Image: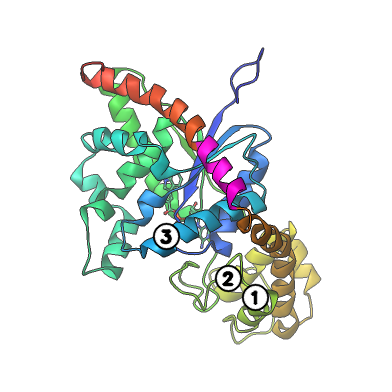
Amino acid sequence: MEQANSAPRKRIFSGIQPSGDLTLGSYMGAIKNWVPLQDEYDCIYCIVDMHAITVRQDPALLRRRTLEQLAQYIACGLDPVRSVVFIQSHVPQHAELAWVLGCYTQFGELSRMTQFKDKSKKHADNITAGLFTYPVLMAADILLYQADLVPVGQDQKQHVELCRDVAQRFNGVYSDTFTLPEPFIPKMGARVMSLGDPSSKMSKSDPDGCVFLMDAPEVIQKKFKRAVTDSETQVRFDPEHKPGISNLLTIYCAATGKSPEEAEEVFQGQGYGVFKPAVGDAVVELLRPIREEAGRLMADKAYLEGIYKEGAERASHLAAKTLRKVYKKVGFVAR
Ligand code: TYM
C-alpha cells in the first residue's frame, strides 16, 4: 500500500455492520465518501460482523448478508487491490486489542453513549455486556490500523471521539502508541432521515422509511411518493420548519451533486407532486449500476472469497504490528 520513495500516505479506516441490508443512509453517510478517498489515502474498509452480534442475529442470514455487503462494497466502487477490504471476525487482533482497551475505558464514558442508550431501550430484554462495550471494539478497529481519518455519518461521531479519548489516555500512560483519529463527516448526507418520520434517522430497522441499496426501482419510487412532507407547497431547504422537504432535498443533492440552492431553483414553482418523484428518479439512477453490479458479483462466490481472504491477510499483518507494540507496553511477556 505504501508507495516507494514518498512519505507514507495517511490511513483511513471505516466499517459497517452486516446487521441488515445496506441503506441509502449508510451509502450517503459513509460508502459514497469512502470511494474517492481511495485516491489519496491508504484505505481499510471492514464488514464489522462482530459488532452485529451485539443484538441477536439469525446465523444463516448474518452469513448471507456479510457476503452481500462485500459484493455491494465492491459494486459501490471500493477497489480491493488499492484498499484492504475484509471481514472483522477474520482478524483476531480486533478482539484482542478490544480487551486491552476495555481496561482503559471508564464505565461512565460508555454509559454516556447515545447509541447505547437508544439500543438498550429498543432491546430492553437483551442488554448485553457486548452492547455496552461495543464502542471499545470500535476503538480497537480504528486504533489497530493507526487510522488518521474515520469517514462516518453524524451518528458515529461520539464513538470516534471516545476512541480518541481512550487512545490519548493510553498514550499518556505508555508514551505514543496510537495515532489519534479524526472523524470525517460529509457536508451532504451525514444524517439522512426516515422518509416516514423525518424526525428520526433512516435506519434498517424501519423498512418503510428506509431505502435499501438493492431495492427495485419501482419500490424506491413508491417509497419516495409516500414520503412525509408538510402542508405547504414550496420546495425550500429549511430543516427546522420543513424537515421532510429538507431531508428530500439533502438526498437529492447527495445523489446529484447539486447544492441546496441549485436544487431549490430546479423545483421553483413546482409542487411536491413533481418534486417527490424527481428525488425518486435521482436515487433510482444513483443506485441502478450498484444494484446490477452487486447482483453479478453475488453469483461469483469464488471471486468474493478471494477478496476477503486476501483482505484478512493484509489487515492481519498491519494489526499484528500494533498489537505487538501494545502487549509489550502493558507488560505482557513476549511469545
Ligand atoms: P452502522 O453500521 O450503523 O452504519 C454504517 C455507517 O453509515 C452511517 N449511517 C448513516 N449516515 C447518514 N444517515 C443515516 N441515516 C445513516 N445510517 C447509518 C453511519 O454513521 C456509519 O458511518 N459502529 C459503526 C460501525 C463501526 C465502525 C467501526 C465505523 C464499527 N467499527 C470503526 C467506523 C470505524 C456502526 O454501527 O455503523
Spatial separation of the CA atoms under disc 1 and disc 2: 6 Å
Q: Residues within 10 Å of mark 3 (few under 14, many from 20)?
A: some
Residue 44: image location, x then y, percent: 53, 37
User: Disc 2 designates what residue?
Assistant: 211
Would you place residue 93 above or below residue 59 in this image? above
Q: Secondary structure at mark 2?
A: loop
Q: Give the residue displayed 38% in from the left and 56% down from the top.
A: 52
Residue 43: image location, x then y, percent: 57, 35
Please report whichever mark, 3 or 2, sits nearer to the chain's N-terminal start. Answer: 3
Q: Give the residue displayed 40% in from the left and 39% down from the top.
A: 141
Q: What is the three-letter code of the residue carrying label 3?
A: Leu
Question: Pointer 1 and pointer 2: residues touching (CB < 8 Å)?
Answer: yes
Magenta stretch in the rendered image: 301-311
Residue 279: image location, x then y, percent: 70, 72
Spatial separation of the CA atoms under disc 3 and disc 1: 24 Å
Spatial separation of the CA atoms under disc 3 and disc 2: 20 Å
Q: What is the three-letter code of the residue carrying label 2?
A: Val
User: Disc 3 designates what residue?
Assistant: 62
Question: Pointer 3 and pointer 2: residues touching (CB < 8 Å)?
Answer: no
